[in-house]
């Protein structure tokens, strides 16, 4: 597998320096969430051991290619990969889902169980994701570069992402596209016989940009998780993210995932369905990718039980258990029908305060979407998504 092309040691060191600069930008970065006016730190992965290890692996992989040729532009990359031996089949698919929604677990099951290919290097496993993320470092870094050029990051201002501006920034040399070029050498490799799986939650936002860069249209696997569980998980992992902030991100990521993938062949799933019957659910996803979305069949046709056993640990679903335990004695805030209800949750704000009301409003907004995912309405072409850009928050976040 070709990771990247470099002609000498100087270029390799330049790539390493760029990676260091990107990591440094993560550390101590104070940002303000649009429409919330909330200052907070973005997740600083630069000092996390798994991120450091991942970058070291990335530097090593790039170094291996130091004797390869350099200099292809995007047209030349496409010209290199002109031998398509897979007919009209889709070469792979992209997993879309909000952070902390089970996308890593689902991707791991698909990769290890059926043999879908991610390429690499990948971000290393972490304490809160011991089985691995299944995210290519180059894709993550390139998406971060797209975001940073527009004054945003994975956890702030993502509602305003402009896919066309990202493409213009690339064409005009306003951003470095080395990472994206490496990723495209893998994703646009027409000689590949194994179907690829690409996963990065940022793709919910950046997907339209990448669709213009891919030679072939991918399929999509979309998954979601209860919004309160996601917000609780984010709050525990990122000290700067409140429940309201996490719920808002849940809305934006899921909304953009559905909007941006509307014209693609999609397979829908849920974190709950995977946890309830993992072998059956993941087998269904694989079958629909092959039979309905016409993705190249993976090398393995059946999900091995030992793979399921190695990935599924119900004891790790702490936030799900916490939410369900709270709901046993909580009053119903709103009944959305079809057995889907929003129940009162433990808030850090005083009941009746402006902050409490704002948090409750965004929670009910998220729960409306969640219930519409459950009943299928949110997948309809004319579904009305909330207008977050003009949502008037009752009070400034303290």
Image (spheres, helix red, strand yellow):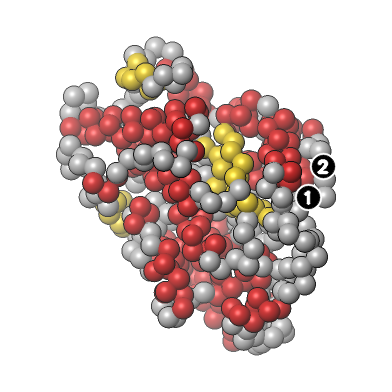
Check disc 2: other Cα within 10 Å, few if <14, some if 14-19, many if 20+: few
Question: Residue extending furthest front?
Answer: 382
Q: Mark 1 points at which residue?
A: 297
Secondary structure of the residue carrying tag 2 is loop
Q: Where is residue 128 in the image (x, y as percent from the top left)?
A: 55, 42
Q: Can residue 297 be seen in this view?
A: yes
Q: In the rendering, at what x and y percent does residue 382 appear?
A: 41, 40
Please give the residue where the numbered disc 2 appears in the rendered image.
301
Where is the C terminus found, in terms of image quarters? top left
108 to 209, vertically: above or below: above
- For the residues bearing labels 2 and 1, Cβ distance under 8 angstroms: yes
Depicted 304 relative to depicted 1: above or below: above
Q: Residue 22 carries which label?
A: none
Q: Which residue is drawn at 21% across and 26% down?
A: 350
* Residue 176, placed above or below residue 379: below
Q: Characterize the local packing of mark 1: few (<14), some (14-19) or many (20 or more) Cα atoms within 10 angstroms.
A: many
Q: Residue at x 32, y 40 (%)?
A: 386
User: Is residue 211 found left or right of 21 in the rendered image?
Assistant: right
- Camera-nearest residue between 77 and 320: 77
Label 1 element class: loop
Residue appearing at x 41%, y 19% in the figure: 337
Give coordinates of residue 100: x percent, y percent: 51, 41
Report whether 143 appears left or right of 286: left
The residue at the point 45 percent across, 71 percent down is 167
């Amino acid at each position: 597998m070709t990771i990247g092309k470099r002609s000498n040691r100087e270029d390799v060191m330049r790539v390493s320096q760029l990676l260091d600069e990107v990591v440094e930008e993560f550390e101590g970065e104070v940002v303000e969430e649009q429409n919330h006016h909330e200052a907070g730190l973005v997740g600083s992965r630069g000092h996390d051991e798994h991120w450091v290890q991942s970058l070291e692996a990335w530097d090593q992989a790039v170094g291996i290619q130091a004797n390869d040729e350099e200099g292809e532009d995007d047209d030349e990359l496409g010209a290199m990969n002109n031998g398509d031996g897979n007919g009209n089949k889709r070469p792979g698919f992209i997993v879309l889902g909000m952070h902390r929604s089970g996308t890593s677990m689902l991707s791991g099951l698909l990769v290890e169980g059926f043999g879908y290919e991610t390429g690499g290097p990948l971000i290393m496993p972490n304490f809160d994701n011991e089985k691995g993320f299944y995210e290519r470092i180059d894709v993550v870094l390139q998406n971060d570069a797209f975001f940073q050029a527009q004054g945003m990051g994975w956890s702030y201002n993502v509602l305003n992402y402009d896919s066309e501006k990202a493409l213009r920034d690339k064409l005009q040399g306003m951003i470095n596209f080395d990472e994206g070029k490496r990723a495209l050498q893998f994703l646009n490799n027409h000689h590949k016989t194994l179907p690829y799986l690409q996963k990065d939650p940022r793709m919910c936002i950046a997907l339209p940009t990448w669709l213009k860069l891919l030679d072939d249209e991918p399929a999509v696997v979309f998954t979601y998780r209860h919004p309160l569980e996601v917000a609780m998980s984010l709050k525990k992992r990122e000290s700067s993210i409140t429940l309201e902030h996490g719920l808002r991100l849940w809305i934006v990521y899921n909304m953009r995932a559905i909007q941006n993938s509307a014209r693609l062949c999609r397979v829908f799933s849920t974190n709950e369905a995977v946890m309830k019957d993992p072998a059956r659910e993941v087998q269904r996803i694989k079958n629909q990718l092959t039979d309905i979305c016409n993705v190249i069949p993976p090398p393995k046709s059946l999900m091995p039980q030992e793979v399921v056993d190695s990935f599924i640990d119900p004891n790790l679903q702490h936030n799900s258990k916490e939410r369900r335990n709270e709901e046993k004695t909580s009053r119903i805030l709103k009944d959305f029908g079809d057995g889907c209800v929003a129940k009162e949750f433990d808030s850090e704000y005083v009941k009746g305060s402006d902050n409490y009301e704002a948090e409750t409003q965004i929670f009910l907004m998220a729960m409306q979407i969640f219930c519409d995912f459950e009943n299928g309405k949110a997948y309809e072409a004319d579904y009305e998504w909330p207008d977050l850009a003009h949502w008037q928050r009752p009070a400034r976040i303290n």
